[in-house]
Amino acid sequence: MDWNTIFFVIWPYISLTILVVVTIYRSIVRPFTISSQSSQLLENKRLYWGSISFHYGIVLVLLGHLVALVIPRSVVLWNSVPLRLYLLEITGLGLGLWALAGLLILIFRRATVRRVQVVTTPMDVVVLVALLVSVVSGVLVATLYRFGSTWFTGIFSPYLLSLATFSPRVELVAPLPWLIKVHVINNFVLAAIFPFSRLVHIFTYPIGYLIRPWQIVLWNRKIRTQRSQ
């Protein structure tokens, strides 16, 4: 057994199993732990610009990956015209940089706003680091190994399909440069830690909120009294 087998055969199944099992467990046994635990009330301005940039950028990038995975032939046909290929590559890189800018704002906010620091958990830090590795490595891959929208359809689409059919073709990813491997491995790390973080609400919303019991939220506030002079 070599490292490629460990990281691209065994580890993907472990991470995806953790993702599914823990998410289902939290949804059924601990439904009230599923929350975004928003810190918007603690600081809003930086959160707005960071969250908008990161979420829109990363969602559009993931949608592009999904299209290449589900209907790879459409991407190949699109890229058959050089101008469209360049347009797609530049757009993807731009979206990646947009997501990176938003993520850096969110990290800076966590590190500098005292009230946000107080409610930051170790898992929040782990998730932010994993996201940073994923986005930075993705931007570097798009910059150093161009035309990824084309070679993705010939390498990762069949590789991920082979995982889904329980016949993993590790030979497809074994020859890849280490930077691309880091990007892939880290994404499986993200899949494994997501259900233990506040981000698990992404996978359960809105279904979980429709079937769980009512939750009553009380706002407690200390009222300061002033002595009359």
Image: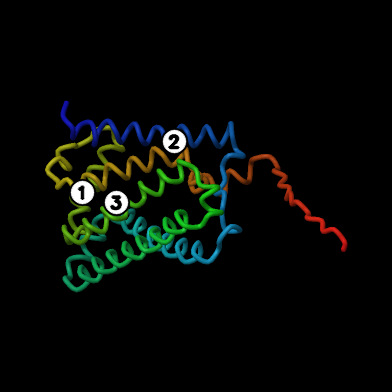
Ranked by sequence position, the earlier of labels 1 and 3 is 3
| Image position of 214 (left or right of 98) | right
Give the residue drawn at x 49%, y 37%.
23
Q: Position of residue 12 (x, y in %)?
A: 30, 36
Ranked by sequence position, the earlier of labels 3 and 2 is 2
Q: Quadrant of residue 10?
A: top left
Separation (CA) of disc 1 from disc 3: 17 Å
Amino acid type, callout 2: Val
> Alpha-carbon neighbours of circle 2 within 10 Å: few (<14), some, or many (≥20)?
some
Amino acid type, callout 1: Ile
Tell me the quadrant of the picture where the N terminus can be found: top left
Name the residue beneath numbered marker 3.
69
> Which circle marks residue 37 in the picture?
none
Ranked by sequence position, the earlier of labels 1 and 2 is 2
Name the residue beneath numbered marker 1.
180
Give the residue drawn at x 46%, y 58%.
109
> Which circle marks residue 20 in the picture?
2
Q: Quadrant of residue 173?
A: top left
